[in-house]
Amino acid sequence: MNSAVELKDLKKNFGKTEIIRGVSLDVKSGERHAVIGPNGAGKSTLFNLISGRFLPSSGAIHLRGENITGLRPFEINRRGLSRSFQVTNIFPRLSVWENVRCAVLWSKGYKYSFWQNIDRLEDVRARTAEILDQINMTARAQTPAGVLTYAEQRALEIGITIAGGADIILLDEPTAGMSRSETEHAVALIRKVSEGRTLIIIEHDMGVVFDLADRISVLVYGQILATDEPVKIKSNQKVQEAYLGAAGHD
Amino acid sequence: MSETTKAIPMASETSMAARFKRYGIWIVATIILLVAPYIFSSGASITTMCLMGIMIVFALSYNMLLGQTGMLSFGHAVYYGLAAFATAHMMNWVIKTGAPIPLPLIPLAGAAAGLFFGIVFGAVSTKRGGTAFAMISLGLGELVYSSSLILRSFFGGEEGISADRTKLLRFFGYNFGSQIQVYYLIAAWCLLCVILMYAITRTPLGRMCNAVRENPERVEFVGYNPQFVRFIAFALGGLFAGVAGSLAAINIELAQASFVGAAQSGAVLLAAYMGGVAFFVGPILGAIIVTLLSIKLSDFSEIWVLYFGILFITIILFAPYGLSGLLMMHAQFWRGPLSSRIARFGKLFGSYLVAAIPALIMILGAILLIEMIHHIVQKSAEGPMMHFLRSSRFTVNTHTALPWVGGIVALIGGFFAFRMTWPVVAKAWNNALADAQRSGA
């Protein structure tokens, strides 16, 4: 299988503080890959490096074999990698419809056009409607995103992330802060939208992780302790000591 | 059709009603612009309307940055002023060479100049948003203003560059010697620019400008470069500011250093903010009112700038979305059968009237006190008698107690009476809201 995202001895330090201390990881095309680890392990920093939000201190990031180290977020996004955020990151005073539409525009090739009426772009309209339908928010299309409930904002966050049709999707704790039923709903949504794509997901809810993931990487203090299939991770002695045991207290 | 599908904007509205909804407003605007000089036909009115038209274009171009893209500029007059100079030079060149270019096409030169400087300075200043952008705009404004006093050949020093607009090739027999001909030239360009700027808000770029205003970081993760979005918006803002500056130069046949100055940059900021930057119509309202006030207020008082400042602060404090925001707050009451709408607005405006009377007394009291203080401090040589609001009918003796006591009583008494009307307005507001919700359901 081809690799979708490959990290080569990636390091990131802020001043003297090392957050990512040499991570090498090969996420295969089409797999659902979960990244777990205790708080402060560097999971979100890892996402920030892959998506171009931070520059790595050393090491390299390859996207389908192409070196994307040092590219800016929009350049990486245009190459088919899209991400969501742990803290909801939407356009609060724009409607739900506008939020999703903004995320559709580039992928449809309209770029910085200021000569086309946006309401007449049939392909953009159709794609936006399709995404709203997928995230179950058609009825909320005209609502300003800022007044949605928390769970709705999380769903919109996923909608914005998938709207551009990226085939590699990074989701940062998509179910954090959700009730049980909301989580179930979100997992079903994630399963649906990641069909036929590569998914990398940071998640604290072990139920979600073992339910969804094809493979799991355990990140502890900026290093990968193990990468394997869920059953093998579960029985891995090192992982249990470092993380799963401790996580039981949550 | 179910409620859910209705929520999605339809791709193409083809019914007559929808067509009228889309174009009707522009037809109405065209008619207003055409007939306005017949209703306000005095020379002073036409001159005022010319200034309004110029300010509308300028304020809307400013709002492409502030309201649409979230860029607070303190130097927007740079593009307005440089385009005005470019226009004056262009006109003189056309006159000298006899090039077959009529006056109505000259604003294109202003547009080109505005766009050019928008691109040059925008390339520097739009690298950053927020406070950094605001500071760079301030610096660029000062830079260009001080250059205007140094580079005398281009800026013409103190006198500026003058150009005779009547010496160009005649346009269907018109030489634009009279103000009314200039009015129609400005009105036509104003309408064209307003339509274009409105259309731009409804394009992919226009919507991404809003997204950059809301959350520039997230924009980067949906494939857009927020710096480039800002840059294009800035360049286009420069283009339309250039048209406004060009019209200004044509209007007074002169381009001066003050055109690029901080006062001009401040005026457009005031106009946009007073009108409200959140709605497209806001800066239009603001431009009309600021132009009107800056001409009319000086008829009543020497210290009108003070009142203008107080008014601005009042609007910022109590109506942060500006005048258009206040108007839009009333849109929610405009539902149900027509008779109930009229009854609802009648009751609401009745309560406003109740509040307006003591408010007016309070304001007059304050103005009387301010004017008397100004008279005593600045004009003691003229003696104790003062013409209130420059009216010969209301003469006040500032050395007697009566006007002072009267002013204080009106100010304080007016305030407390005004304060007592607030619950009346609040109640009327809530009633109107409840009534509108009932009839909307």
Image (spheres, rainbow, N blue to C red):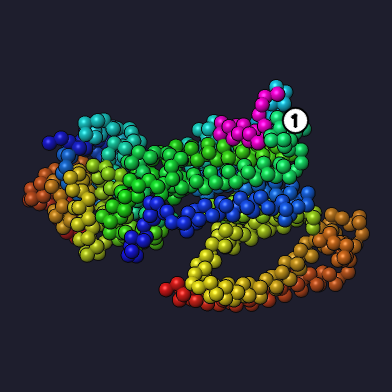
User: Would residue B31 be seen by someone viewing this image from the given angle?
Assistant: yes
Q: Is residue A237 above or below residue B324?
A: above
Residue designated by label 1: B167
Q: Is residue A87 left or right of residue B70?
A: left
Answer with the quarter of the image where residue B103 lies.
top right
Amino acid type, label 1:
Lys
Quadrant where the C terminus of chain B lies?
bottom left
Q: Is residue A217 above or below residue B91?
A: below
Q: Residue at point 21% right, 45% down?
A: A200
Answer with the quarter of the image where residue A167 lies.
top left
Q: Is residue B11 left or right of residue B309?
A: left
Mainly helix, strand or loop, the magenta region? helix
Question: How dense is the environment of label 1, judged by Cα within 10 Å: few (below 14), some, or many (20 and up)?
Answer: some
Residue B364 placed where, x, y %?
A: 75, 67
Answer with the quarter of the image where residue A138 lies.
bottom left
Q: Residue at point 37% right, 46% down?
A: A121
Q: Residue at point 61% right, 50% down?
A: B30
Residue under mark 1: which chain is it in? B
Residue A3 placed where, x, y %?
A: 17, 36
User: Would residue B278 be seen by someone viewing this image from the given angle?
Assistant: no
Please tell me whether mark 1 sits on a helix, a strand or a loop.
helix
A33 in magenta? no
- The residue nearer to you, when weighing B35 against A170, is B35
Residue B232 placed where, x, y %?
A: 48, 37
Q: Is residue A20 left or right of residue B237?
A: left
Residue B109 placed where, x, y %?
A: 62, 31
Q: Which residues are magenta?
A: B98-117
- The residue nearer to you, when weighing A39 against A193, is A193
